[in-house]
């Protein structure tokens, strides 16, 4: 049975992300000179690697998501590393997320179905996700992927236990994941660009534009989920904050 979410649980999750973001931002301002130097070194290293740079970053991000490590960390790093080329960073994030979606689904379906079910059975959202995919199929996956703060790396494995066919699952997952990935990558890129250029720089409008694009994506995402709120009505039996991306 789908239940209405507790506002306090979602407020707690949002507070964790906002608090972490403010901590990083204030730390960046305080250590701005050291950070700027490190960022230039990172970008120079990636540019020196030529096309191997994005490939290496994609492999790292893929493994990170497959292991179900906290998504915002790696997405923020991708946005940071490619703050001068945020759309390339988004392509890397989408590619890595897609690889993790494929691996998680296939592992659960063909290699360790019983083990994955035992692993996820106690998760507070697992039964709800099964209900939504059974009721709405690939469209349910699409909307679930757009939900902020949902543990999507774990969901890759959980969805492999469903009756969904592979290709509809993958297409719905990729398309639904893009908005959340864009929020993290563009948000990190805009913030880093702002820290690096400073408020008095002529390129301030570039950083402001990236941050504005992130806000627009958030607003569109929020409006979409509000219109499809029945899918967002899930409530964990116990409050649980999981630092996972919608990759």
Image (tube, rainbow, N blue to C red):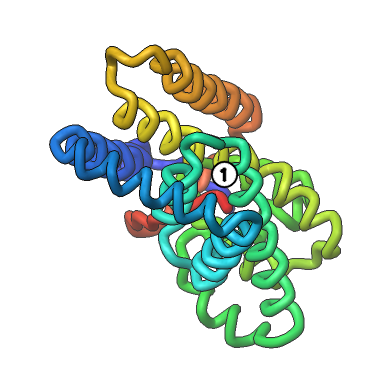
Observer-nearest residue: 182 or 155?
182
- In the picture, measured across the screen, residue 227 lies left or right of residue 148, that is right
Q: Where 243 falls versus 33 (above or below)? A: below
Viewer-proximal residue among 144 and 170 = 170
| Number of marks present in the image shown | 1
Determine the residue positioned at 20% across, 44% down: 34
Asked which secondary structure carries label 1, the reply is: helix
The reply to whether residue 231 is in sight is no
- Residue 205 position (above or below residue 47): above
Tell me which residue sits at (35%, 45%) in the image.
Answer: 39
Residue 150 horizontal/vertical position (percent): 50, 50
Residue found 51% across the figure and 54% down from its top:
46
Give 73 or 57, whichever is nearer the viewer.
57
**Disc 1: CA contacts within 10 A as few (<14), some (14-19) or many (>=20):** many
* Residue placed furthest toward the front: 48
Residue drawn 80% across and 67% down?
163
Residue 203, image quadrant: top left
**Mark 1, residue position:** 89
Q: Position of residue 208 (x, y in %)?
A: 43, 17
């Amino acid at each position: 049975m789908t239940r209405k979410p507790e506002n306090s649980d979602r407020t707690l999750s949002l507070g964790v992300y906002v608090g972490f973001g403010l901590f990083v931002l204030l730390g960046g301002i305080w250590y701005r000179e050291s950070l700027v130097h490190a960022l230039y070194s990172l970008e120079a290293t990636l540019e020196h690697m030529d096309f191997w740079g994005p490939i290496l970053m994609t492999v790292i991000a893929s493994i990170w998501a497959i292991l179900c490590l906290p998504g915002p960390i790696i997405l923020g790093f991708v946005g940071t590393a490619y703050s001068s080329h945020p759309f390339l960073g988004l392509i890397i994030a989408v590619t890595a997320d897609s690889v993790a979606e494929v691996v998680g689904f296939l592992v659960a379906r063909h290699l360790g179905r019983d083990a994955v079910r035992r692993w996820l059975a106690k998760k507070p959202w697992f039964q709800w996700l099964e209900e939504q995919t059974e009721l709405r199929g690939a469209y349910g996956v699409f909307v679930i992927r757009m939900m902020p703060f949902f543990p999507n790396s774990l969901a890759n494995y959980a969805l492999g236990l469903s009756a969904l066919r592979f290709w509809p699952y993958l297409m719905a997952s990729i398309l639904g994941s893009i908005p959340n990935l864009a929020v993290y990558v563009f948000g990190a890129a805009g913030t880093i660009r702002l820290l690096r250029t400073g408020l008095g720089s002529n390129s301030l409008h570039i950083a402001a534009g990236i941050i504005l694009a992130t806000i627009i994506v958030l607003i569109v995402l929020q409006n979409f989920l509000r219109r499809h709120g029945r899918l967002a009505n899930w409530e964990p039996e116990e409050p649980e904050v999981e630092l996972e991306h919608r990759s």
